[in-house]
Image: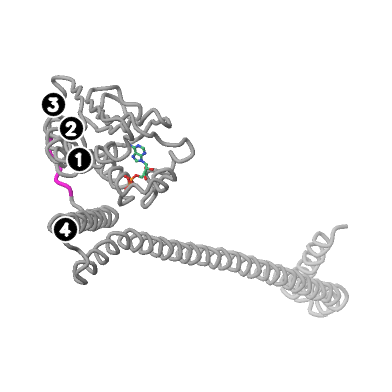
Amino acid sequence: MPTSLAKRIAASDYLSVRNEVLASILEGSTKEAVNLDLQGGVPSFERVRQDLEEIKRLYDVQASEQLANVAATSRRTVFRLIGVLGITLALASASVWAIQRSKMLGAIQLAKLQMEFVASVSHELRTPLTVISSAADNIADGLVGGKDQLKRYGSAIQNQCRQITELVNQILLFASTKDRKNRYTLRPLQVSQIIDSVLDNTAELVEGAGFAIEQRIESGLPSVMGDLSALSQCLQNLIVNAVKYSGESRWIGISAFVENSEERSGKEIRITVQDRGIGIDRLEMPHVFEPFYRGAAVSAAQIHGTDLGLSLAKSIAEAMGGTLSVASELAVGSVFTLRLPIAEKQ
Ligand code: ADP
């Protein structure tokens, strides 16, 4: 028989004995009631008492089992919490370490670039300064005689001063484009307006070097959005290079036309500056737009330059929302292409 059923039977036995005892008392048979109580009531009450004891013990066992369960669960929760906190802490430490490391590498890289920058600028300044200094020494020491010789020295000093000024100007421009301090004034510009400005600025150099510039400008070109002086500087650098790197050729071509854009939907303006000069080696092509890069042949031929021209031109093109690219072949020539977005609301 299940224990709970047995306990219920014991309790109901006691209740029926107690009812019989009460009935006997009410009927006046006290003796019979005492006998009934002694024979049936006391033993069945004893059983009920034992049952209650048993119930209490069972409750105690269950309560301590539940307490043990709660303790085990809370211990597991604490361990899990410690685990999660530990992992979070490890991940956070790893992220902080990675950020600090990348910051440090960035700072080292920046310091390296700054050192290279200073070294390149010093190197570029040394040659003209040496020429100026030795020319001045010769004049001061009375080694330069006659008007003609003095004139030659004077123009050598003038040339070197021009080179230094050009270098300093390019460095200032380069620094301002890199610092994003250079705030361009963008406005709709006619392509012919840009090209006229470039040709005006380079006329002396181009004509002085005996070059002929062939222009092919499509008529009715839409305007571009840009800064006139910056775009003019960009194309000017390309023309100066075409003059420097043309070898025996004395021809430069400038063209401007509308073309479907390869990068965005719609059309764009393309302005090309072409020469039939020394060209660029295939291996050097990826580097020509880097600041302070100078081609090996150009270095060997000691052709003067600031080594910032193309890097500057590219920065300007990109600041106007455009691109600058090159196609070239050694001993055949180079074509630099400036792509510019068309101004909206034509
Ligand atoms: P720089 O001309 O002062 O050296 P640039 O940044 O203008 O500096 O040009 C970087 C290099 O790209 C040059 O040293 C040269 O090797 C190459 N380059 C640029 N333009 C031309 C060109 N039109 N023809 C051949 N090589 C060129």
Q: In the rendered view of the protein, which quadrant contains the N terminus?
A: bottom right
Residue assigned mark 3? 346
Task: Bin the neighbour count of mark 3 within 10 Å (Cα to Cα): few under 14, some 14-19, many 20 and up.
Answer: few
Residue assigned mark 2? 224
Residue 7 placement: quadrant: bottom right
Please identify the residue farthest to the top as the structure is shown: 219
Q: Nearer the viewer, mark 2 or mark 4?
A: 4
Q: Are marks 3 and 4 in contact (CB under 8 Å)?
A: no
Earlier along the polypeptide chain: callout 4 or callout 1? Answer: 4
Q: Is residue 180 visible?
A: no
Q: Residue shown at 15%/35% (left/top)? A: 199
> Front-most of 34 and 237?
237
For the record, the magenta segment spans 184-188
> Front-most of 90 and 133?
133
Q: Nearer the viewer, mark 1 or mark 2?
A: 1
Earlier along the polypeptide chain: callout 3 or callout 1? Answer: 1
Residue assigned mark 4? 154
- Disc 3 marks a residue whose amino acid type is Gln
Earlier along the polypeptide chain: callout 3 or callout 4? Answer: 4
Residue assigned mark 1? 231
Query: In the rendering, which numbered label is found on residue 313?
Result: none
> Front-most of 206 and 61?
206
84 sits left or right of 158 in the view? right
Residue 63 image position (x, y, % from top left): 71, 71
Between the C-alphas of marks 1 and 2, the distance is 11 Å
